[in-house]
Image (cartoon, grey):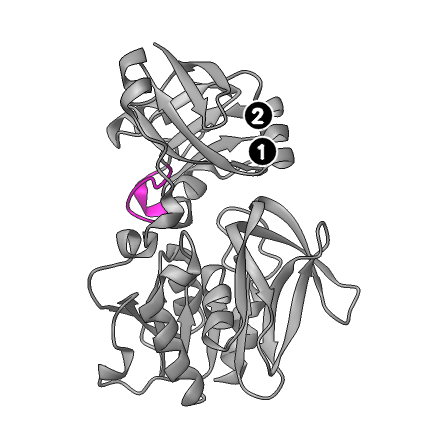
Amino acid sequence: MNAKLILKDGEIFEGQSFGYEQPRSGELVFSTGMVGYPESLTDPSYEGQILVSTYPIIGSYGVPDKKYWESSRIHVSGLIVSQYIDTPSHFQSQMNLGEWLKSLKIPGLVISDTRYLTQKLRDQGAQLAKIIFDTSTSLSMNFDDPNLENLVAAVSTLKVSKEGKGLKTVVLIDCGAKRNIARNLVERGVRVITVPWNFDIFSLKEKIAGVIVSNGPGDPKMVDITIKTVKKVLAKKIPLLGICLGNQILALAAGGDTYKMKFGHRGQNQPCIMVGTKRCFLTTQNHGFAIGKIPEGFSPWFINANDNTNEGIIHKKYPFMSVQFHPEATPGPTDTEWIFDEFLKKI
């Protein structure tokens, strides 16, 4: 079926549908990842966004069993690709990408010139867009800005869960956590208690050895309750690690500030330099906000080699640290898994 991608600035792109045929709106962004679309699409950090894939061929290895996903569902509002392959070849494939999108009611469009679309977003910045399938919908449908909502409340777990049998207990505040964060901790012999974004972690009976604030979608300033929780964690000097959105939440809780980036970082090839060294790590990233003002008492830990934006902070005295990238990866390089070991050393 023919469909259209309409940008808020008025530009229209014709496309062919290969997903669920329902109009959707969101923030149009792009990812430079070559692989890993099942993990990326199930990353809660993409909530409310229409994703453009810069890699031209998508769908060639199908969709694996849900145990390999990073959450229980697809979080993008829509997917834009240059070429869709509906005959996947991979031993883990359970279905093709189009079938998966249809089953979870996510529209997907083939728009041949994703290169131009991506260059437009790089030059002009991420912008609002909508996918429509008929003219009447085009006139009546608004351009919804997901960043005006508390998206974390829409993706965070609703219950407290526990896994692992380690002697040390780490609380994972789920702001939209990818599953591989907990997997990495359990593999390292840690007992993990995952809690909702607005949960009072100090009501737990267990002794808390450390706290991790996870990745998640949207504007960090919307996540007010988590920011208040982190302030209490800092006051109690409990070791803390922030990941992605958690990096920004730590900065806000400690007195720093954040801002919305022009088009953000999304993909598995973002180079990050450890401050004070010549070491550069390839990282998986997915964010549209960043730290603008580093809070007092903290030092920059990593910077992005492409644009010099902040990629992490670490306290000069206390065991507080955070990174803007994803040390748990999935998809992408595992160059920075050692961040978990560094955090556990503090515990």
Q: Disc 2 on helix, strand or loop?
A: helix
- Circle 1: residue type: Leu
CA–CA distance between discs 1 and 2?
Answer: 6 Å
The answer to whether residue 199 shows anywhere in this view is yes
Q: Are marks 1 and 2 in contact (CB under 8 Å)?
A: yes
Q: Disc 1 on helix, strand or loop?
A: helix
Q: Quadrant of residue 77?
A: top left
Residue at x 33% of width, y 19% of height: 138
- Circle 2: residue type: Leu
Residue at x 63% of width, y 36% of height: 122
Residue at x 45% of width, y 65% of height: 246
- Membership of 136 in magenta stretch: no
Residue extent of the magenta highlight: 65-76
Pick the front one: 187 or 57: 57
Residue at x 60% of width, y 61% of height: 336
Q: Quadrant of residue 120?
A: top right
Pick the front one: 331 or 204: 204
The answer to whether residue 22 shows anywhere in this view is no
Position above or below: 9 against 300:
above
Q: Residues within 10 Å of mark 1 (few under 14, many from 20)?
A: some
Give x and y (percent) for residue 250.
48, 72
Pick the front one: 185 or 1: 1
According to the picture, the residue beneath numbered tag 2 turns out to be 117
For the image, the number of numbered tags is 2
According to the picture, the residue beneath numbered tag 1 turns out to be 121
Give x and y (percent) for residue 90.
45, 29
Position above or below: 38 against 322:
above
- Quadrant where the N terminus lies? top left
